[in-house]
């Protein structure tokens, strides 16, 4: 017998309101204080007495109906997990010159009804063997998404789901700290335990489905009524504030995960496409060799490079070397899983599609086919880009003092580089070094103590609890250490025989947020991402035999805007590989090359085009 939706569950509803109150407080007091206060309050609330008539667990665990459990959980999702979303909507709507109060107050009701629809759909109408597993899974996943949203400002759209699923366990462990654990325990695990222990009164399958359908119909009718009354308001606010679509839990990550699963597991694999079956390498003069080292950085932002005018000296090592900094360089994505494959593909950012990029030749495939000796040295995972070329992976489990069992300092890349430079067998060689760079949130683990230039740093992973000054110092130490590694690469190239044409190109995959406007880390939807996550550094160095007009290059680097779209074509140009897919207009260096380097633009490539 159904005793109503909520009447006898008020103590548990008080727990929901308590969590909502905590969420509100989180915006105003330090996380550690609010978590500690909440923990003490919840513990006192639940353990004050063991007598059933005042212990809230008794009310939850006693003979609760399926619809009651669904409604209470939906209420929890609405008031707690969607509090940031409701807060953003409130701010947007109340900022309008005129707004409808009915529309404003209908939003949490709409979220509540949508949560009911999702729960009933995933649990097949509250099926006795699905209801609890579905609710517990949604609670735990939503707690993680909620923590990311509250703490770092991260939303789980398609790109973030892809980045998360392609990350290894060591990367996930970086986010583990006492605050994340406590947050997860209180907002996810504790409610999940309560649901797991609840005594749900299941009816026969037919009656159970009938009751669930009745609840779904009531919520559906409510949704239709809200749409009928306020559709113009929803349409207007939604169109003008698309970022709101990324904030709702669990809808956003469920949709994104569904799309990811569709694309990666349920779509027909595309046939691998040869963009050019006959790329041509222009060989050097007799006895001469050409070596290009490309360093792919991680999480570096351009405005923290002193080469680009940053007030702190974060490039002390390359400052004394003849490097050129491209001041207006922008990434293809805001996460490694997007930027790396995109950067090495012939696709532009607007054209980029993960499946399409994976099913056609990338830069490495093309130059390898042309006859270039290619080596990828990996300290960060190549996201599928290096699958078809020779690869050396840094062993994090080695007994090297540069490694801790989970990660290695980027200095570990120098030994494989040195070994390759001492054993050049081809006329043209491309060596790609994929760096760990400034990967957060454990910035303090990216540089050794002897490279700790800015002493007042913040050696912790819960970076939201660092002061702004110490957090920036920690991040800037990673930039300075990256600069040291770059300078060592240049030194090694400078030591090659005098007739060797050598060059170095460094570019980061994406940038990073360091607390500006409450945002941390990276991975935001590109259209909504702040400049700091998209504006990346690009440095180049050329040995004298390369005959590059550095004055011309410096002028272009300062005056023009470039992006990862330029990398594919620029690398073909530097390696002197003629191809039907090469576009001179996207070659960063085409207008500043010496005559010996112009063959790629005037040779077979031009004929094929």
Image (spheres, rainbow, N blue to C red):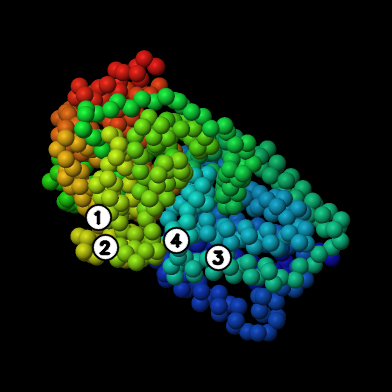
Residue where numbered disc 4 is placed: 170
Q: Secondary structure at mark 2?
A: loop
The x, y position of residue 438, in whole percent, is 32, 53
- Residue at 26% in and 25% down: 590
- Among numbered discs 1 and 3, the one appearing first in the sequence: 3
Q: Are marks 1 and 4 in contact (CB under 8 Å)?
A: no
Residue where numbered disc 2 is placed: 448
Residue situated in front as seen by the camera: 601 or 416: 416
Relative placement, left or right, of 231 versus 97 is right
- Residue at 40% in and 64% down: 397
Q: CA distance from mark 4 to mark 3?
A: 24 Å
Q: CA distance from mark 1 to mark 3?
A: 38 Å
- Among numbered discs 1 and 2, the one appearing first in the sequence: 2
Image-quadrant location for residue 499: top left
The x, y position of residue 88, in whole percent, is 49, 49
Q: CA distance from mark 3 to mark 2?
A: 36 Å
Q: CA distance from mark 2 to mark 4?
A: 19 Å
Q: Secondary structure at mark 3?
A: helix
- Residue at 29% in and 17% down: 602
**Closer to the eye: label 3 or 2:** 2
Q: How busy is the neighbourhood of tag 1: few (under 14 within 10 Å), some, or many (20 plus)?
A: many
Q: CA distance from mark 1 to mark 4?
A: 21 Å
Q: In the rendered image of this protein, does residue 558 appear above or below residue 390? A: above
Residue where numbered disc 1 is placed: 481
Q: Secondary structure at mark 4?
A: helix
Q: Are marks 2 and 4 in contact (CB under 8 Å)?
A: no
Q: Are marks 1 and 2 in contact (CB under 8 Å)?
A: yes
**Closer to the eye: label 4 or 3:** 4
């Amino acid at each position: 017998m159904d005793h109503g939706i909520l009447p006898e569950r008020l103590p548990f509803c008080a727990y929901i309101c308590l969590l909502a109150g905590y969420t509100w407080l989180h915006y105003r007091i330090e996380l550690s204080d609010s978590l500690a206060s909440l923990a003490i309050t919840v513990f006192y609330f639940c353990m004050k007495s063991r007598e059933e008539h005042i212990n809230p667990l008794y009310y939850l665990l006693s003979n609760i109906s399926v619809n009651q459990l669904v409604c209470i959980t939906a209420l929890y999702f609405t008031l707690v997990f969607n509090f940031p979303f409701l807060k953003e909507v409130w701010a947007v709507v109340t900022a309008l010159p005129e707004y409808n109060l009915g529309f404003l107050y209908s939003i949490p009701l709409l979220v509540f009804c949508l949560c009911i629809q999702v729960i009933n759909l995933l649990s097949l109408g509250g099926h006795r063997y699905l209801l609890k597993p579905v609710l517990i899974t949604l609670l735990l996943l939503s707690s993680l998404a909620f923590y990311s949203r509250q703490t770092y400002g991260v939303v789980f759209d398609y790109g973030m789901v892809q980045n998360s699923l392609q990350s290894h366990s060591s990367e996930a462990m970086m986010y583990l700290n006492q605050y994340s654990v406590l947050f997860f325990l209180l907002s996810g695990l504790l409610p999940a335990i309560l649901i797991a222990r609840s005594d749900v009164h299941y009816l026969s399958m037919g009656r159970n489905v009938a009751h669930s359908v009745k609840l779904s119909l009531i919520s559906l009718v409510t949704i239709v009524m809200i749409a009928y009354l306020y559709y113009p308001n929803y349409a207007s606010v939604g169109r003008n504030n698309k970022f709101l679509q990324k904030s709702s839990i669990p809808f956003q990550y469920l949709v994104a995960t569904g799309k990811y699963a569709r694309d990666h597991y349920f779509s027909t694999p595309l046939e691998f496409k040869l963009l050019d079956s006959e790329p041509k390498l222009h060989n050097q003069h007799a006895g001469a060799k050409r070596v290009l080292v490309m360093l792919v950085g991680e999480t570096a932002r351009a405005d923290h490079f002193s080469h680009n005018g940053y007030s702190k000296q974060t490039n002390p090592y390359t400052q004394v070397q003849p490097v050129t900094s491209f001041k207006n360089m922008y990434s293809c994505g805001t996460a490694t899983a997007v930027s790396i494959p995109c950067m090495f593909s012939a696709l532009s950012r607007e054209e980029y599609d993960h499946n399409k990029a994976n099913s056609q030749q990338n830069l490495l495939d093309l130059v390898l086919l042309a006859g270039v000796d290619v080596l990828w040295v990996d300290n960060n995972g190549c996201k599928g880009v290096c699958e078809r070329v020779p690869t050396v992976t840094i062993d994090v489990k080695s007994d090297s003092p540069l490694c801790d069992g989970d990660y290695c300092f980027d200095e570990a890349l120098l030994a494989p580089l040195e070994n390759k430079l001492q054993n050049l067998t081809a006329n043209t060689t491309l060596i790609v070094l994929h760096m760990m760079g400034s990967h957060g949130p454990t910035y303090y683990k990216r540089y050794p103590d002897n490279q700790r230039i800015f002493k007042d740093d913040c050696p912790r992973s819960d970076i939201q609890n660092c002061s702004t000054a110490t957090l920036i110092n920690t991040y800037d130490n990673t930039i300075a250490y990256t600069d040291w590694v770059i300078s060592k690469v240049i030194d090694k190239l400078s030591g090659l025989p005098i007739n060797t044409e050598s060059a170095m190109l460094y570019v980061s995959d994406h940038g990073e947020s360091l607390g500006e406007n409450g945002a941390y880390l990276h991975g935001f939807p590109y259209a909504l991402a702040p400049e700091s996550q998209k504006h990346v550094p690009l440095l180049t160095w050329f040995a004298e035999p390369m005959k590059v007009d550095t004055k011309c290059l410096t002028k272009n680097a300062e005056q023009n805007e470039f992006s990862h779209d330029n990398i594919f074509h620029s690398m073909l140009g530097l390696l002197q590989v003629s191809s039907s897919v090469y576009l001179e207009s996207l070659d960063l260096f085409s207008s500043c090359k010496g005559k010996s380097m112009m063959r790629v633009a005037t040779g077979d490539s031009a004929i094929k085009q």
